[in-house]
Image: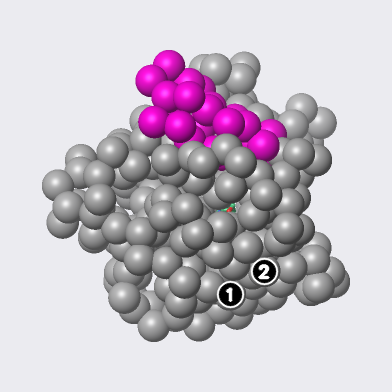
Amino acid sequence: MKILITGSNGMLGHDLQEVLKDNHELILTTSKTLDITDKNQVLDVIREKKPDVVVNSAAYTDVDGCEDNQDIAYCVNGEGVRNLALACKEIDCPLVHVSTDYVFNGKNNRPWVEDDEIDPINVYGKSKLKGEEAILEILDKYFIVRTAWLYGVNGRNFPRTMLELAKNHSEITVVYDEVGSPTYTLDLAYGISQLIETEHYGIYHLTNSESCSWCEFARFIFEVADVDVEVIPVTASEFARPAPRPSYSVLENKNWIDNGFKPLRSYKEAIKEYIELIK
Ligand SMILES: NC(=O)c1ccc[n+]([C@@H]2O[C@H](COP(=O)([O-])OP(=O)(O)OC[C@H]3O[C@@H](n4cnc5c(N)ncnc54)[C@H](OP(=O)(O)O)[C@@H]3O)[C@@H](O)[C@H]2O)c1
């Protein structure tokens, strides 16, 4: 297949390349070569390249930054996705779009399923929801893939920050009242590579299996990396950040399983492999 990837310099974009490059022809675009907020450029590039599928891994992902830069957030995560959907509609090609657990409000006592009520509580989540809405309005052939707590070799992320901090701190405070499923971008990319071989269009939750709090995740990272540091649990309100986060954002990978795909491995197995790779 001829696959056009947006945001290919990003954390997920990098691993999509790794996973897809051997079996597909890739058209790799970055914010410099394809700015998804530029409608004419999006239409021109997609008309010219005529991909069989577009995978959108471009986004404005700075969750706290979105609070101060709302225009950018809505422009990239909302309008940018609309532009891609319009272009895909025109050439009749499916769009894979990566969305987030932050479209939910976090107030649940069981993992979220795809058709649970969406109610984002920060600008990032609201802007990502605009992107989802544009796709639902314009396209029939789409995969909206909601994922969570990403980390990968090509970007800043929680495990890397923890390991960096541990180099010159003996104690680290970490939030314990936010729970989710840490997800390795390589595993997510493998998932996407399976989805695009099908026509099972729709909304998917896709994360590594099992869940934990940030605090438990930090402790597990240090255990695996054999680093001696004390993790001090704090509440999200003690650890003030500009954007509120949902307190419970575990995603049940229901459509994924219902469509016959194998669950992604446990986050514990995935983080072990990742730490081995970056240490
Ligand atoms: N990170 C997480 O924990 C997380 C959790 C849930 C869902 N997600 C979603 O997963 C996807 C991938 O996330 P990620 O962590 O891999 O993101 P990332 O590393 O921040 O990469 C995003 C990429 O998008 C590009 N980009 C930004 N604005 C653009 C524009 N106007 N046109 C084209 N490209 C643009 C960036 O390029 P420049 O650097 O050149 O600007 C960057 O390479 C995103 O949709 C994100 O919302 C992420």
Label pair 1/2, CB-CB below 8 angstroms: yes
- Residue 19 shown in magenta: yes
Crowding around mark 2 (Cα neighbors within 10 Å: few <14, some 14 to 19, many 20+) is many
- Residue 101 visible to an observer of this rendering: no
The quarter in which the C terminus is drawn is: top right
Q: Is residue 225 above or below residue 142?
A: above
Q: Is residue 178 above or below residue 174?
A: below
Q: Is residue 46 left or right of residue 115?
A: right
Q: Is mark 1 within 8 Å of ligand 1?
A: no
Q: Which residue is mark 1?
A: 130
- For badge 1, the amino acid type reads Lys
Q: Residue at image x 76%, y 39%?
A: 33
Give how far apart the Cα atoms at labels 1 and 2 are: 8 Å
Q: Is residue 45 above or below residue 234?
A: above
Q: Which residue is mark 2?
A: 79
Q: Which of marks 2 and 1 precedes in the sequence?
A: 2
Question: What range of the chain is rendered magenta?
Answer: 1-29
Q: Is residue 80 above or below residue 268?
A: below
Residue 173: horizontal and vertical position, in percent? 69, 52
